[in-house]
Amino acid sequence: MIKDITIGQFFPGKSIVHRLDPRIKLLLTVIYIVMLFIADTFLGLFTGVVFLAAAYVISQIPLKMILKSVKPIVPLIIFTGILNLFFISTGETLIKFWIFRITTGSIKTAVFMIVRIIALIIGTSLLTYTTSPIALTDAIERVLSPLKKIKLPVHEVAMMMTIALRFIPTLVEETDKITMAQKARGADMESGSLIKRAKALIPILIPLFVSAFRRAEELAMAMECRCYHGGEGRTRLKQLHCEPRDIYAVIISAAFTALVIIIDRVNIF
C-alpha cells in the first residue's frame, strides 16, 4: 500500500500537458476542482470526468499510475460511501434495519461522492505528474508574488511547499524500507488490538523522524554550499512564458466548466 502513493512524483514527457506553462497548470487545476464541486448531477460530474480522461490521454501518463494514485485512498472512499449510504434518508426506502435504512437517495449520493473523490485525487495528481519540482516552485512563486507587498516571504514559502511535495515519495520509500526491516526482525504490526498495533508503529516512526531530520540537514548544507540565500537577486535559467497552447487550454477548461453549469441548470439527471 505504501509503495502505491504517487503524490509528488514527476514523470518526464514531451506531451502538450507537460509543455504547458506551470502557472497555467495551477490555474487549470483550480478550475478543475471548481468544476467538480459545482457539479450537482451525474451528467455534470461525467462531463468533468471526460475532461480529466482527455487530459490524461494527452499527457500519456500510464494507466497503472492512475490506479496507484487511487489505491491508497480506498479506505477513505469506503468510509465516505458508508456515511452517505446510512445517513442520507432521501428517496424511497429499500432496506431498513435497526436505526439505519438504505434509500434510493442515499445510494445515489454515495456513488456520486465516491466518483467525485476519485476524480478529485486523480485530477490533482496530474499537476505533479507533468510538472517538475523546479517549475512548480517558480509557478507558485509567480502566482503568490503580489503578496510580497505585505512582506510575505513568497520565495521561501514556495520553496518549502515544493520541497515538502518532492520529499513525499522519498519518505514513503524510507517508511517501506523501515517497515520491512522491522518485520524481518520479528515485529508484528498486523495483529492484536488497536492500541497494540499503534504501539508497534513506534519502531517505525522513530527511525523515520531521524531519517527525515538527517535528510533535511543534508539538504540545508547542500544549499548553503551552493550559496543559496533565498529569492533575493536570484535569476532563472528558464523564464516562464505563456504560449498560444496555454490560452487554448484555459479556454477549453472554461468551456467545460460552463458546460457543467449549463447541465446543472437544465438538471437533466
Image (cartoon, rainbow, N blue to C red):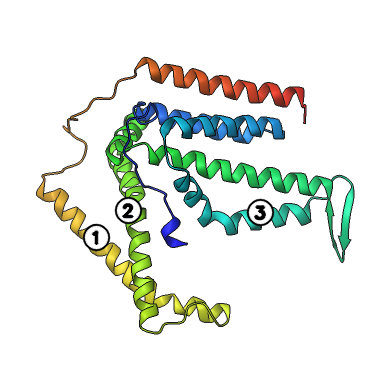
What whole-number distance in Å separates the C-alpha atoms at marks 1 and 2? 10 Å
Give percent across and percent down for residue 182: 37, 78
Give percent across and percent down for residue 88: 79, 50
- The residue identified by callout 3 is 80
What whole-number distance in Å separates the C-alpha atoms at marks 2 and 3? 28 Å
Q: Residue at x 51, y 56 (%)?
A: 72
CB-based contact (under 8 Å), mark 1 and mark 3:
no
- The residue identified by callout 1 is 215
Picture mark count: 3
Quarter holding the C terminus is top right
- Looking at the image, residue 230 sits to the left or right of residue 49; the answer is left
Dot 1: within a 10 Å radius of its alpha carbon, few (fewer than 14), some, or many (20 or more) residues? Answer: some
- Looking at the image, residue 227 sits to the left or right of residue 65; the answer is left
Q: Residue at x 34, y 17 (%)?
A: 243
Q: Amino acid at mark 1?
A: Arg
Element under disc 3: helix
Q: Using the image, determine if residue 181 lies above or below residue 97.
A: below
Give percent across and percent down for residue 238: 22, 28
Q: Of marks 1 and 2, which one's residue comes earlier in the chain?
A: 2
- For residue 135, what is the image quadrant? top left
